[in-house]
Image: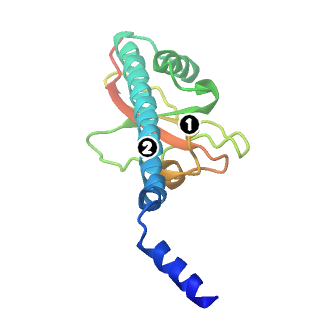
Amino acid sequence: MMIPLARHLRRFRRRDEGTATIEFAILFPAFVMILLSSVEQGMITMQHSMLERGLDVAVRNVRLGTGDAPQHDEIKAQICEYAGVLKNCDTTLRLEMVQVDLRNQVAFDRSADCVDTSEAVQPVRNFVNGRENDLMLLRACVKIDPIFPTTGLGKQLAKDGAGQVALVAMSAFVQEPE
């Protein structure tokens, strides 16, 4: 009984069919992870580029509209209109505008003011229209949902309580005289 079993095991050990299956089983998850992370990175890059574009066009409109003092909701609507691909932009976009004094350098708060849909609604942190020739910084933060939140890059991103990722863009302009 032991001799036929030993002979059978020896023959089984010498055969090389199925070795490609082992390599496939080891390498396939790594390739899928790279593919999913690439798609995630591409979507994040596209959405961030569109946020930057929307912010730049809106700030350009503010600069060209001399004498106007655009309000928060107007600028927010313009950014959402020009950004295009951002889902729920009107509810997840948050703007912050502050005046910067070039002669008295004060540190600008590095943490972006973003919406967290898992928490209660918070008022706008700071949105002040400047006077003539004031340097203004406008920062926009929008929250997006990762495509693959449990794998690859989507798992590594810093998320809030609702599982959303923050995209932040900033632009500066000088308030034109009337």
Picture quarter containing residue 98?
top left
Q: Earlier in the sequence, mark 2 or mark 1?
A: 2
The image shows residue 18 at horizontal and vertical percentages of: 46, 60
Q: Name the quarter where the C terminus is drawn.
A: top left
Q: Name the quarter where the N terminus is drawn.
A: bottom right
Say which residue appears at 37% left-offset and 22% top-offset. Answer: 56
Q: Residue furthest right?
A: 120
The image shows residue 93 at horizontal and vertical percentages of: 56, 31
Q: Residue furthest left?
A: 103
In-front residue for pair 53/147: 147
In-front residue for pair 30/70: 30
The image shows residue 65 at horizontal and vertical percentages of: 39, 9
Mark 1 — residue?
Answer: 144
Q: Is residue 85 above or below residue 166?
A: above
- Considering the numbered disc 1 on the image, is that residue within a helix, a strand or a loop? strand
Q: Which mark is residue 35?
A: 2
Would residue 157 be seen by someone viewing this image from the given angle? no
Q: Give the amino acid at mark 2.
A: Leu
